[in-house]
Every structure is written in structure tokens, then in C-alpha cells.
């Protein structure tokens, strides 16, 4: 039997164990130092290179988005929303991350309304470094476009998921038209009533900054603040813990409540559209004001545009269509200013109710001749009382009264009636130079409405003095504004002026302003149009107007219509008075103001 010789084993010792642990410790230490060194190397030496590489491929691992506050609503006096925020989609292209420009262009062209060729060209040029490497292809996408885009995105994501499942082993790089295409959800300003009060409300840009109208005037109140959120995206699309960073804070804007009544606004605008169709003017405006407190119930302008289609509309009509003519149109009031002169003269004691005047049709003032308009075929009005002067719109008699009153007192009257101040935010003040160097002809001209410029809203507010028993009530556009009033005329003189203005409608130049069942007081105006920036008047161009209040003996509303450069007639009594009557009749019915039985009886007698 063969003997087996066993090897001699080395005895295990503490020294051996210590040596192994020390070696292992040094190994981990060296590995740790290597990792730290590698991190330092990447974060310092190669930091810029890696940052550029990340940017080249769209920075896919870091995501930044905006948390939006909501811009305040614009509402009418009944709480109807005139302007609001709604959600929209925007398409943002990171060109350097796009893998298939042609496919992206072909997919998105029907959505954004551009040609595929144009879109592809923009992407390719951005990839080559021509222009910005990232850009918005479309913003404020709403309606059917949103539905179609969401369907396309859902289908593409479903396709990619199936392709990944089929190629689970990897090795195939998947590309998609979604590469480099971000679909962002953003707030979008919308206007539920479309074109209603378009020039008054105004609009914002795509970043919701007010650019016109109320949106601009009260942008500080309406504006919201937004916050930027940034974070690193994990493999499953989640924000990695500890990487979320919030910059700024979110605050919603505050609502603005207007005195406007959207139903009265709609009435005024519908009536203006009839004026536009019949007389084809350069523009027109209408104002309806509560005679008791100055609330502006309607501030209408024509032509109109749909604020929800403002980009296309502005390209078609130009930015001038957004002019709020009711607040910023400066024009010579013509005959509508005569009652102001006469009331001021009565208040000063220069004339009284029984004062008589004679009009031969013309009057010499220095080297100049003042003439009356040939209403009814003759310029001469003959012997007249104050009531006749207003009813027949006599230039000669009004010039006489103005010369008696004097330049200084006439100028002060324009101030007391509010013509030379801004009635509401965004409006202009009227224009009239100081009377220090006025000659007699200047005073005479101003007396019957030439040489002074006013705004439609300023003229309406002045006529509210007659409706309000002699008190000026500052117009209000915001519901929370305090009422501001001041005395201008005595109640007795204001009452007399109401009588005179009734006569204009009953027997004078304003017969077409009559409204069945109501007493109407008002005044026609026909003025030549001033050449902007020059002296003199534009040949053949006129501004027709009518301003009044109803019911005359207990006024509820003041209404005004101004028509710029009308055709098919140009006298205020022919062009503006019928529109005033239509607006007044419908608004009084809407407000529930009952017809006056005595007026109905009087009309019945006249009809017989």
C-alpha cells in the first residue's frame, strides 16, 4: 500500500488578516479617489465640452417649464365675461434635437397652417446655426387644432412604445417626428363676445401683455406673475429628488369690472353697423351713458374686428381699426356746441329766456362774414327767441350771443362743462387755446362750435349737465370708481335748456331723432373736418353728430352718435339722428323705462 504524503499547511495568522484588510482598504481608497478624480475631471476640464454637447442634443435631461398665473377677467356690469384666459398649446422646436426635419414639417404643416417646405427650411437653417437654434413654430393653438395635435402626439407615442417592445434587445436607434418637438401648454387670451366692444377692451400679445384698450390701460391690475420650475429628468420621466428648483412665485391677476352693459353695447354696435352700410363712413362711434351717475353703458366703435382673430383682422384692416374713436377722436363739434354757449350766457345773465335776435342769413364780424346753413332752403331765420335759435341751429344768433358773453367767459364755460379735461382713463382732453389773443371772429366761431376740438365722450358728458339739473357728472368706466360731480348751471337754466333741446326734435333740425312714446331732447351737429396738422378744412369732408337724452323730462340716458366722413348725406339730422333714435328706443325698452302716456296721446293727435 502506497503512502500519500500530505503538504504542509501555512498557519493562519493575525498578521495575514491585517495585510489583506489593508490591501482591500487601499483598493477601495484608490477606486474612490479615481471616481472623485473622474467627476472632477468631467466637471472642470470637460465641463464646457459636455455643456455644449448637451445643448447640441437639446438638453434632454434637464427640463424647465413655466407655472402660469391666470390673468384677471374683464367683466361687464352684470358679471358677463368680456375677456378671459383659456388653455392653449404652443409648438416649440429645438432644431438641433430634430432627427427628421422633413417628417416634422409634413406632420405639423396642416396644424399650424404653413407650408411643409417653409417649416423644413426653418428647421434646417436653425440646425446649421443660421438664426436661433430653438423657436416657437406656433403659439396660442386652440380649438380643432389642439384636438388634432393631441391625436397625432398620442399616435406617435403609441408607435414608439410598440417599436421599443419589438426591439427590446436593443441595437436599433428609434427616431420620431417628436424628437426636438415640445408641446407646451400655455394660457391664451380669449374674448367670448368676439367683436363686441373690441376697441374698448383691446388685446394682449402672446405673452399676455396688454397692447391696447382696457388690456393696456389696466395691465398692472390684470397681469399675473409666473414661476419658472427647473429639474433633472430621470429615466422614467420623473423629476429627480433634490433637483427641483422654483424661480419666482405665481400670482393671479385681479378682475376689472366695467360699467358697460354687454346688451346695451350690442344694441349700439348693431345700430352703428346700419350706419356703416348706408353711409359708408371712415368710422363711427356711439356712447350710451347713465344720466344719473355717469356710468358708461356702451362705448361702441365701427368698423369692428373679432378679437379672437385679431392677427388676421389687423393684417386686413390695419391697426387703425383698434382706435377707440369714442374716447380719442378729436373733432369740431359744430352746432352741438351752441347750447353750451347759450347756457353759459344765460348763467352769466347776458341773455335770458325772452331775449330776441334777428338773423338775415349772414353777419359781418370785422373782415369776415358768418353765414347760417340753408336748412329748409333759406339761410335767414328772421326774428327768433332763444328757443328758436337752438331749434333752428342759427349760427348768426349764436355768434351774437358769444360776442356778448366774451372770450374769457366762453373759454371758462368750456372748462366748467369738462371739455378740456380727460373724462376717463385712456381718453383725450379737448383742445382750445387760451383766449388772450382771440379776435372777435375767433370768439364768434367758437360760440357756434368752430375752432374748438372735443371728444365724443366729452360731448356726451357735457350734455349730461342739462339732463342732471345743471350738475356735471364725471363719466365712469369702472364700477368701483367714486362718483364725481360739480355744479355748472342752476336747475332753472338747465330746465330751460331741456325745453330748447326738446324743440330741436319736435320742430327743428332733429326731427329724425324722435322716439315713439317718449319726449326726446337733443341737438344735431354738422362740422367740416379739420385737416390734421394743418390750418383749414378738408374739402367735402364732414362729421355728422347727434347728442341728446331721454326721456327729456326725467332723463335716464344720454346717447351720442358721431359719424366721420359719411356719404349719402352729411347733415347730423340726416345721418346721426336716425341712429340715435334706434339706439335710444331699444335701450329704453331694455331698461324697462315705460312709455309716457301724454307723449303717446300727443303723437296720436299729430297723426290725425
Image (cartoon, grey):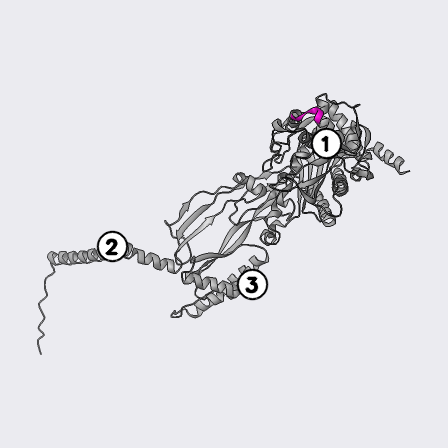
Asked if 399 appears above or below 276 in the picture, the reply is above
Residue 407 located left or right of residue 208 = right
Q: Which residue is mark 2?
A: 36
Who comes first in sequence, dot 1 or dot 2? Answer: 2
Front label number (1 vs 2) = 1
The percent position of residue 391, horizontal first and vertical second, equals 79, 32
SS of the residue under disc 2: helix
Asked whether disc 3 touches disc 1, contact meaning CB atoms under 8 Å apart, the reply is no
Question: Residue at the location (74% across, 49% down)?
Answer: 278
For residue 324: magenta? no
Residue 249 located left or right of residue 10 = right
Residue 110: mark: 3
Asked whether disc 3 touches disc 2, contact meaning CB atoms under 8 Å apart, the reply is no
Can residue 552 be spotted in the picture?
no
Q: Please give the range of residues in magenta.
A: 403-407
Can residue 249 be spotted in the picture?
yes
Residue 18 located left or right of residue 454 = left
Amino acid at each position: 500500500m502506497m503512502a500519500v504524503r500530505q503538504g504542509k499547511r501555512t498557519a493562519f495568522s493575525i498578521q495575514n488578516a491585517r495585510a489583506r484588510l489593508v490591501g482591500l482598504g487601499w483598493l477601495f481608497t484608490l477606486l474612490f479617489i479615481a471616481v472623485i478624480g473622474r467627476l472632477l475631471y468631467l466637471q472642470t476640464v470637460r465641463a464646457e465640452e459636455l455643456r455644449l454637447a448637451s445643448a447640441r442634443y437639446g438638453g434632454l435631461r434637464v427640463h424647465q417649464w413655466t407655472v402660469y398665473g391666470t390673468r384677471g377677467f374683464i367683466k361687464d356690469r352684470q358679471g358677463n365675461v368680456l375677456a378671459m384666459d383659456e388653455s392653449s398649446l404652443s409648438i416649440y422646436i429645438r432644431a438641433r434635437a430634430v432627427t427628421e426635419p422633413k417628417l416634422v414639417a409634413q406632420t405639423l404643416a396642416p396644424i399650424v397652417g404653413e407650408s411643409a417646405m417653409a417649416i423644413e427650411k426653418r428647421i434646417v437653417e436653425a440646425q446649421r446655426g443660421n438664426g436661433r437654434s430653438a423657436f416657437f413654430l406656433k403659439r396660442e393653438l386652440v380649438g380643432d387644432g389642439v384636438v388634432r395635435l393631441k391625436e397625432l402626439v398620442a399616435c406617435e407615442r403609441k408607435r414608439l412604445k410598440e417599436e421599443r417592445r419589438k426591439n427590446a434587445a436593443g441595437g436599433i436607434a428609434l427616431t420620431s417626428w417628436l424628437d426636438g418637438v415640445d408641446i407646451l401648454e400655455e394660457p391664451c387670451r380669449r374674448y367670448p363676445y368676439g367683436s363686441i366692444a373690441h376697441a374698448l377692451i383691446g388685446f394682449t400679445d402672446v405673452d399676455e401683455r396688454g397692447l391696447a384698450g382696457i388690456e393696456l390701460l389696466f395691465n398692472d391690475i390684470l397681469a399675473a406673475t409666473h414661476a419658472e420650475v427647473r429639474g433633472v429628468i430621470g429615466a422614467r420621466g420623473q423629476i429627480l429628488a433634490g433637483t427641483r428648483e422654483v424661480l419666482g412665485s405665481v400670482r393671479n391677476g385681479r378682475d376689472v369690472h366695467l360699467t358697460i352693459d354687454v346688451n346695451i353695447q350690442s344694441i349700439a354696435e348693431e345700430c352703428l353697423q346700419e350706419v356703416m352700410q348706408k353711409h359708408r363712413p371712415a368710422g363711427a362711434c356711439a356712447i350710451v351713458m347713465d344720466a344719473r351717475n355717469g356710468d358708461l353703458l356702451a362705448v361702441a366703435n365701427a368698423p369692428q374686428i373679432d378679437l379672437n382673430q385679431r392677427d388676421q383682422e389687423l393684417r386686413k384692416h390695419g391697426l387703425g381699426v383698434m382706435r377707440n374713436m369714442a374716447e380719442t377722436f378729436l373733432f369740431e363739434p359744430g352746432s352741438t356746441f351752441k347750447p353750451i354757449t347759450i347756457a353759459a350766457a344765460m348763467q352769466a345773465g347776458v341773455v335770458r329766456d325772452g331775449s330776441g335776435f334777428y338773423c338775415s342769413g349772414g353777419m359781418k364780424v370785422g373782415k369776415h362774414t358768418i353765414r347760417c346753413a340753408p336748412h329748409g332752403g333759406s339761410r335767414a331765420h328772421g326774428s327768433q327767441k332763444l328757443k328758436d335759435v337752438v331749434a333752428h341751429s342759427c349760427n348768426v344768433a349764436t355768434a351774437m350771443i358769444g360776442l356778448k358773453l366774451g372770450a374769457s367767459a366762453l373759454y371758462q364755460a368750456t372748462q366748467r362743462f369738462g371739455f378740456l379735461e380727460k373724462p376717463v382713463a385712456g381718453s383725450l382732453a379737448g383742445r382750445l387755446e387760451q383766449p388772450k389773443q382771440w379776435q372777435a371772429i375767433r370768439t364768434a366761431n367758437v360760440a357756434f362750435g368752430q375752432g374748438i376740438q372735443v371728444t365724443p365722450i366729452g360731448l356726451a358728458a357735457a350734455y349730461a349737465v342739462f339732463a342732471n339739473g345743471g350738475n356735471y357728472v364725471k363719466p365712469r368706466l369702472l364700477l368701483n370708481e367714486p362718483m364725481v360731480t360739480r355744479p355748472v348751471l342752476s336747475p332753472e337754466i338747465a330746465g330751460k335748456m331741456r325745453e330748447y333741446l326738446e324743440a330741436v326734435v319736435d320742430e327743428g333740425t332733429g326731427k329724425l331723432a324722435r322716439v315713439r312714446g317718449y319726449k326726446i331732447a337733443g341737438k344735431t351737429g354738422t362740422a367740416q373736418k379739420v385737416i390734421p396738422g394743418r390750418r383749414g378744412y378738408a374739402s367735402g369732408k364732414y362729421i355728422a353728430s347727434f347728442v341728446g337724452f331721454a326721456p327729456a323730462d326725467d332723463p335716464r340716458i344720454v346717447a351720442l352718435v358721431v359719424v366721420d366722413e359719411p356719404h349719402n348725406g352729411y347733415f347730423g339730422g340726416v345721418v346721426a339722428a336716425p341712429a340715435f333714435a334706434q339706439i335710444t328706443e331699444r335701450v329704453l325698452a331694455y331698461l324697462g323705462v315705460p312709455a309716457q302716456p301724454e307723449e303717446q296721446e300727443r303723437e296720436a293727435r299729430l297723426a290725425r
